[in-house]
Image (cartoon, rainbow, N blue to C red):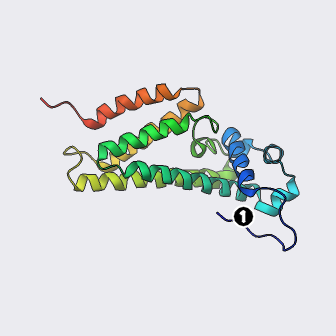
Amino acid sequence: MGTGTHPAGRPRAFDEEAVLDRATEAFWRYGYEGASLSTLTAAMGINRPSLYAAFGSKEQLFQRTLARYQEAQLATVRTALDQPTAYAAIEAFLRASADGLTADSHPAGCFSVQGGLSCSPENTRITEMLAAGRAATEAAVAERLSRAAEDGDLPEGVDARALARFVMALSEGHAVQAAAGASREQLQASVDIALRAVAGPPAR
């Protein structure tokens, strides 16, 4: 991503990508409404005039951080979905999700789940942006599983879209559990059980 535009002769005195990373962590940790301008500027290491000059409003800053997060997430999702079978794709998706939700490099859980779960009516745009990002991930999973169904790579009678919704529901539920302190090992154990359900009943 570029660093944006600013008046000639007045270069920014900060690394924009690093500052956006710190803003992402603040929004992730406190949510959109919980991350006050004072919290954001302290986390980002810049003052309010610099924040406004570089990113516009708080909402525009949130949009930037969310776009970067979702771009990285979709890249991870697409890598998982490139697996040769539906089962392997679902496993790769869920295991990568469990690992990401419990990584030490950022707050536990999921930015797109925690960023705006409880926004007031005047901030419904934030909730809608976050929901749209989750819907894009679900659409990518559903598209992959629909192709698997067409190829005969899903058990007969399985609804690809319902399966995609189940996979997303598990991943999003794991996000809530990770934020509450669940470990990587606990989430992966839950994935083990889900994969048994995906595989269907054992052959008789």
Tag count in the figure? Answer: 1
The quarter of the picture where the N terminus appears is bottom right
Few, some or many C-alpha atoms within 10 Å of disc 1 (few <14, some 14-19, many ≥20)?
few
**Above or below, comparing residue 126 to residue 193 in the picture:** below
The quarter of the picture where the C terminus appears is top left
Residue at x 43%, y 53% (from the top left corner): 78
Residue 185 in percent (x, y) is at: 48, 26
Callout 1: helix, strand or loop? loop
Residue 101 visible here = yes
Rendered image quadrant of residue 58: bottom right
Residue 77 lies left or right of residue 64; in this view the side is left
Residue 56 visible here = no
Residue at x 26%, y 36% (from the top left corner): 199
> Farthest left residue?
204
Residue 82 in percent (x, y) is at: 37, 52
Residue 48 in percent (x, y) is at: 86, 54
Instruction: Report the amino acid beneath label 1.
Output: Thr
**Above or below, comparing residue 59 to residue 185 in the picture:** below
Q: Nearer the viewer, residue 22 or 164?
A: 22
Residue 176 in percent (x, y) is at: 55, 34
Residue 170 lies left or right of residue 147; in this view the side is right
Rendered image quadrant of residue 102: top right
Rendered image quadrant of residue 67: bottom right
What residue would you read off at disc 1?
A: 3
